[in-house]
């Protein structure tokens, strides 16, 4: 497989919240600690969530799982509030980075969120697990907003 052609893990949900609220939840350390990481999702503790919410800004989301600290890092590549957010995604100390695109489309009753995680072809066997993980987080995002998520 050609490394120039990523494997996409895609999750789409309709959330009963406005695009503005959904977009802002991706850039709020307090909200990220409620829906992306933490004991509500898996057996882990949030250690630190820091971010510089601007194009070119970076983030670091540190969690402790089974006694080990894991640092999820990335850089914001594009922010078009409230329609689109694009960022890199990786886990330290690896220098490998993938690309995540979050697109928000307003609906009559909420927002359709579509997340596309572009994986290097070497990671193709992890696409289904990546989709399942993001689906869990997006469902938790809807719950953190006090809303429902629909497939």
Image (spheres, rainbow, N blue to C red):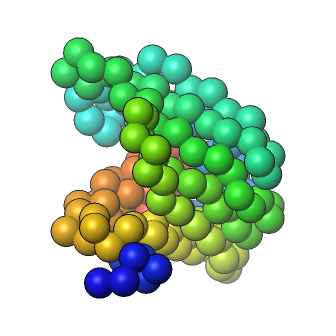
Residue 9 visible? no
Marker count (numbered): 0
Residue in front for this viewpoint, 27 or 64: 64
- The residue located at (39%, 76%) in the rendering is 3
Q: Position of residue 101 (x, y in %)?
A: 58, 67
The relative height of residue 93 versus residue 151 in the rendered view (above or below) is: above
- The residue located at (42%, 34%) in the rendering is 92
Q: Is residue 41 left or right of residue 4?
A: left
The relative height of residue 105 versus residue 52 in the rendered view (above or below) is: below
Q: Position of residue 35 (x, y in %)?
A: 46, 41
Q: Position of residue 38 (x, y in %)?
A: 38, 30
Q: Is residue 65 left or right of residue 28?
A: left
Quarter of the image that includes the N terminus: bottom left
Q: Position of residue 65 (x, y in %)?
A: 26, 25
Quarter of the image that includes the C terminus: bottom left
- The residue located at (38%, 68%) in the rendering is 120
Residue in front for this viewpoint, 28 or 59: 59
Q: Is residue 98 left or right of residue 42?
A: right
Residue 56 visible? yes
Report which quarter residue 67 is drawn in: top left
């Amino acid at each position: 497989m050609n490394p120039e052609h990523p494997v996409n893990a895609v999750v789409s949900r309709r959330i009963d919240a406005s695009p503005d609220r959904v977009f802002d939840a991706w850039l709020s350390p307090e909200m990220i600690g409620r829906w992306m990481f933490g004991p509500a999702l898996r057996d882990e503790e949030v250690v630190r969530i820091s971010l510089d919410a601007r194009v070119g800004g970076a983030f670091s989301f540190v969690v402790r799982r089974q006694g080990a600290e894991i640092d999820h890092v990335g850089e914001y590549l594009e922010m078009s509030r409230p329609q689109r957010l694009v960022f890199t995604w990786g886990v330290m100390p690896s220098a490998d980075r993938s690309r995540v695109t979050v697109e928000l489309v307003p609906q009559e009753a909420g927002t359709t969120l579509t997340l596309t995680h572009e994986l290097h072809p070497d990671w193709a066997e992890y696409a289904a697990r990546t989709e399942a993980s993001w689906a869990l987080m997006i469902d938790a995002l809807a719950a953190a907003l006090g809303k429902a998520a629909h497939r």
